[in-house]
Image (cartoon, rainbow, N blue to C red):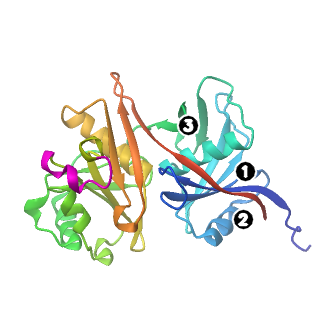
């Protein structure tokens, strides 16, 4: 029997964690994904060749508004941050109406709450699957790949909420921006690096001066790719920082600066420890896709 003929499904592409097009992290969304096989979803994700493509489906949980499956060009993820915000925005723009005050997204990692703050969206960070310090051998391998001395590492941790992030905190945001890592040396690691802007560094911040980002973040993923802006990584970092030292109730991280992006991740830590990760989302493409 010949394969079924493809038909048009609603499609959108968005920029996430930026206030204007082509400045954040792009996401492709297939809004009418019911009936697609896993193989078809994977093929579409490989074709878009974006860091993630999502597929919206009817929920299987009575508590959820919709279900999402998240694919990279090479495999499926249980959770990711910018696909969560971008999928929620695409669902709303397509006429989705949440059953409750907040949107509830179902994904392989469970139920994720998404709230609307004026024109911005934020998700409640899911619990970490793995936390705690990295092994010494891991740290040695990673600093070697980054080309920095071990003494420049101020802290390190697992921050795995699905994708498997490791995190190194270096001495400053300036050091983060100057990195030219040997990505092949990271082997199978997915690495986030972060550095804080000091009080004297306001002029060096990408925007905002003294009111600008508190941290600069970079994310290096499998295959030697630098991710422009990464919600899951920033969620894990925020959970680590909030449990490690007194932090402001709200702060902003910058990411993507070296890639000519303007990624801004809004972080809020509530009194009960809930971490919200938010930012702007911009609809850049809408139409249909044949699958």
Q: Main secondary structure of the magenta part?
A: helix
Question: The C terminus is located in which quarter?
Answer: bottom right
Q: Nearer the viewer, mark 2 or mark 3?
A: 3
Residue 183 location, quadrant: bottom left
Task: Tell me which numbered mark, 1 or 3, is placed earlier along the sequence.
Answer: 1
Residue 217 location, quadrant: bottom left
Q: Secondary structure at mark 3?
A: loop
Q: In this rendering, would 114 be left or right of 40?
A: left
**How many numbered discs, if any?**
3
Residue located at (36% from left, 47% from top): 234
Q: Nearer the viewer, mark 1 or mark 2?
A: 1
Stretch in magenta = 199-208
Task: Tell me which numbered mark, 1 or 2, is placed earlier along the sequence.
Answer: 1
Residue 204 drawn in magenta: yes
Which class describes the residues within 10 Å of circle 2: few (<14), some (14-19), or many (20+)?
few
Badge 1 vs badge 2, beta-carbon distance below 8 Å: no
Which class describes the residues within 10 Å of circle 3: few (<14), some (14-19), or many (20+)?
few
Residue holding disc 3:
119
Residue located at (68% from left, 66% from top): 44
Q: CA distance from mark 1 to mark 2?
A: 14 Å
Q: Is residue 10 visible?
A: yes
Q: Is residue 236 above or below residue 22?
A: above
Residue holding disc 1:
31
Residue located at (67% from left, 30% from top): 98
Q: Secondary structure at mark 2?
A: helix
Numbered badge on residue 40: 2
Which class describes the residues within 10 Å of circle 1: few (<14), some (14-19), or many (20+)?
many
Depth check: 43 or 193 in front? 193
Q: Is residue 214 above or below residue 173?
A: above
Task: Tell me which numbered mark, 2 or 3, is placed earlier along the sequence.
Answer: 2
């Amino acid at each position: 029997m010949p394969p079924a003929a493809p038909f048009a499904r609603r499609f959108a592409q968005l920029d996430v964690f930026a206030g204007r097009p082509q400045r954040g992290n792009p996401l492709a969304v297939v809004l009418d994904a019911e009936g697609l096989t896993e193989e078809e979803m994977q093929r579409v994700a490989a074709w878009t060749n974006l860091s993630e493509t999502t597929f919206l489906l009817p929920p299987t949980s009575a508590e959820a508004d919709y279900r999402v499956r998240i694919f990279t060009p090479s495999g499926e993820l249980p959770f990711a941050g910018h696909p969560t915000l971008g999928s929620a925005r695409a669902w709303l723009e397509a006429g989705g109406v949440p059953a409750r005050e907040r949107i509830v997204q179902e994904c392989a990692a469970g139920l994720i709450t998404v709230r609307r703050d004026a024109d911005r969206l934020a998700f409640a960070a899911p619990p970490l699957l793995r936390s705690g310090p990295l092994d010494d051998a891991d740290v040695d391998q990673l600093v070697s790949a980054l080309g920095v001395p071990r003494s420049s590492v101020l802290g390190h941790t697992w921050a795995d909420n699905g994708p498997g992030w490791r995190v190194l905190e270096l001495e400053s945001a300036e050091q983060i921006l100057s990195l030219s890592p040997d990505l092949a040396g990271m082997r199978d690691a997915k690495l986030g690096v972060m550095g804080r802007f000091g009080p004297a560094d306001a002029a060096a911040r990408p925007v905002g001066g003294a009111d600008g980002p508190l941290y600069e973040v970079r994310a290096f993923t499998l295959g030697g790719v630098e991710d422009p802006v990464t919600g899951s990584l920033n969620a894990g970092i925020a959970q680590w920082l909030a449990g490690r030292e007194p932090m402001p109730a709200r702060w902003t991280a910058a990411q993507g600066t070296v890639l000519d992006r303007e990624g801004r991740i809004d972080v809020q830590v509530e009194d009960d420890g809930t971490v919200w990760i938010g930012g702007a989302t911009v609809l850049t493409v809408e139409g249909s896709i044949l699958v």
